[in-house]
Image: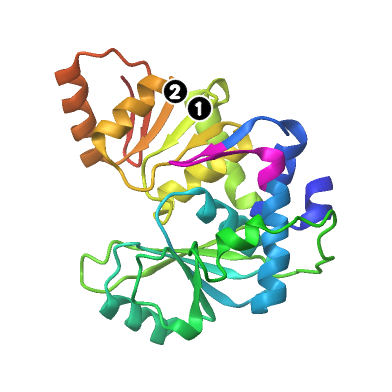
Amino acid sequence: MKSINAVGMNLMALLYVAQKLYPNRIAFQDDTAHITYRDLYLQSQHLADQLSRLYGIRQHQKIAVIAYNHLFLVHSLFALSVLGADIYLLNAEISAVQFQRLNEQHQFKWVIHDPEINCVPLEKSILMEHPSLVSIKSLLQEKICPFHQNRKVKHFSKIIVLTSGSTGNFKSAERSSKVGNFLIPFYQLLTQLNLYRYQTIYIATPIYHGFGMATLCMAVILGATGYLKKKFNVHEACDLLESHQVQVVTLVPLMLSRMLRMIIISCVPYNVLLLGEQLFQRL
């Protein structure tokens, strides 16, 4: 109840609870850095203030996000959610033609994207990082004010993921970020798999896919440490499992097949829970 009163019913409410319960626990670690739950909460609130002040981002606006798995993406999702913006998670491998079609259809206000994504119009572009231009990284590096703006956001931020586009056109799969929408599936995972016993999760699936986004939320609810790799590499994935003793991995069948082949070749024993959209298996 305190979290909803403080930040509203959105993704930030999950993070608010986690930073209260586990302030000094590592929340996420990517290829270059790691961050505690307390710092992730403070920095995400700070980023929300900056996005509101510099770019006028507010509730009901359609904001596209095109990025691989890394900490700047995680910050952006929480910041946009607490502002009440509707978040469109686009495939990082999207083509210029596909993006143009989606942009014409949805009329995105802004597009937050990795620097290697070059199909975004300059007038709508907010870079994740850049050596000289304003970016999510540079905004996060600015001094954090102790108090963020008072926001009266009544709109439940929506999170829209896209289908694979196998028919030639992406289709939207809309999800509200109301906390209640996560409770039933989360409870089922807890009771069926005893997920509360695990404290380390490797999110191997892209966050821009629905399953990756769901796992990110699950990690925060559990107060677990989530490991992120910008892109999936089977050698790096297996090394991560061994070096950090990762207990849970989210996968799709192709990823699983490649990892199993690598594990068999290396003859290294693993004790890990593999979570897939159609798979629950312990290796």
Cα distance between the residues tagged 1 and 2: 8 Å
* Quadrant (top left/top right/bottom left/bottom right) for the C terminus: top left
Q: Which residue is the site of mark 1? A: 200
- Of the image marks 1 and 2, the number of the one nearer the N terminus: 1
Magenta-tinted stretch: 28-40
Give yes or no for residue 29 being in the magenta stretch: yes
| Number of other residues with Cα within 10 Å of mark 2, as a class: few under 14, some 14 to 19, many 20 or more | few
Q: Does residue 178 show up?
A: no
Whether residue 197 sits left or right of residue 258 in the image: it is right
Residue type marked 2: His
225 is higher (above) or lower (below) than 33 = above
**Which residue shows up at 62% across the image and 56% down it?**
78
Front-most of residues 176 and 82: 82
Whether residue 9 sits left or right of residue 157 in the image: it is right
Give SS at disc 2.
helix
Give yes or no for residue 260 being in the magenta stretch: no
